[in-house]
Image (spheres, helix red, strand yellow):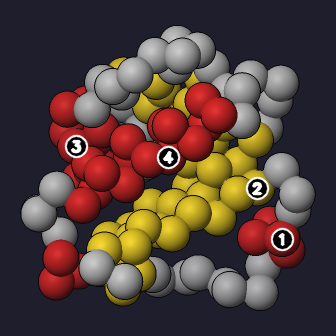
Amino acid sequence: MDGYDERHPDDRLASNHPLLLMHEGTPVGTARLDVTGPRLGVVRLVAIEANLQRRGLGRLLMQEVESYARRVGLEQLEVNAAKEAEGFYQSLGWVAVRSDRENPLMTKSLSPGEIQ
């Protein structure tokens, strides 16, 4: 990732949850879920290995992020999506609330106990 600082203190905050997607024993994707309010989380640092993209792993990663978010009691998620990923998030039920930005702000409501 361009500009990522693995020593940034945000990665070590107790309210921020780094998540790793494993496939056949190999790490293939990552995301971080930051709990920013009583029921609100922000999804950050979403990435799938470049040579494994467009194989459904991003969809799987986001399903796992949402499942984890529900388990920790979150009801609403936000993401500052890369412009080229806006369609991907929309296909997963995310809604753009600020498309006028370089990285559109998108949200997704999670119903407690909902299974997708």
Q: Earlier in the sequence, mark 2 or mark 3?
A: 2
Q: Which mark is residue 12?
A: 1
Which residue is label 4 attached to? 65
Write down the residue under mark 3. 88
Kind of element beneath mark 2: strand
Callout 1 secondary element: helix
Mark 1, Cα crowd under 10 Å, few <14 / some 14-19 / many 20+, is few
Q: Which label sits in the foreground, 2 or 3?
A: 2
Q: Quadrant of the N terminus?
A: bottom left
Residue 16's disc number:
2
Give the amino acid type for the residue marked by disc 3 in the picture. Phe
Task: Tell me residue 66's x, y (percent).
Answer: 49, 37
Front tag of 4 and 1: 4
Q: How far apart are the two marked residues, 3 and 4, measured between alpha carbons?
A: 15 Å
Label 2–label 1 contact, CB within 8 A: yes
Tell me the residue at 57%/63% (across/down). 19
Q: Name the secondary structure under disc 3.
A: helix
Q: Residue at x 16, y 56 (%)?
A: 56
Query: Which one is earlier in the sequence, the residue at label 2 or at label 4?
Result: 2
Say which of marks 3 and 4 sits in front: 4
**x then y, percent, for residue 89:** 30, 38
Label 2 to label 3, Cα distance in Å? 24 Å
Q: Amino acid at mark 1?
A: Arg
Q: CA distance from mark 2 to mark 1?
A: 7 Å
> Gap between marks 1 and 3, in whole Å?
28 Å
Q: Secondary structure at mark 4?
A: helix
Q: Which residue does the image show at 40% across and 22% down from the upper left?
A: 115
14 or 70: nearer the viewer: 70
Crowd rating for badge 4 (residues with CA inside 10 Å; few <14, some 14–19, many 20+): many
Query: Of the residues tagged 2 and 4, which is closer to the observer?
Result: 4
Q: Is residue 101 visible?
A: no
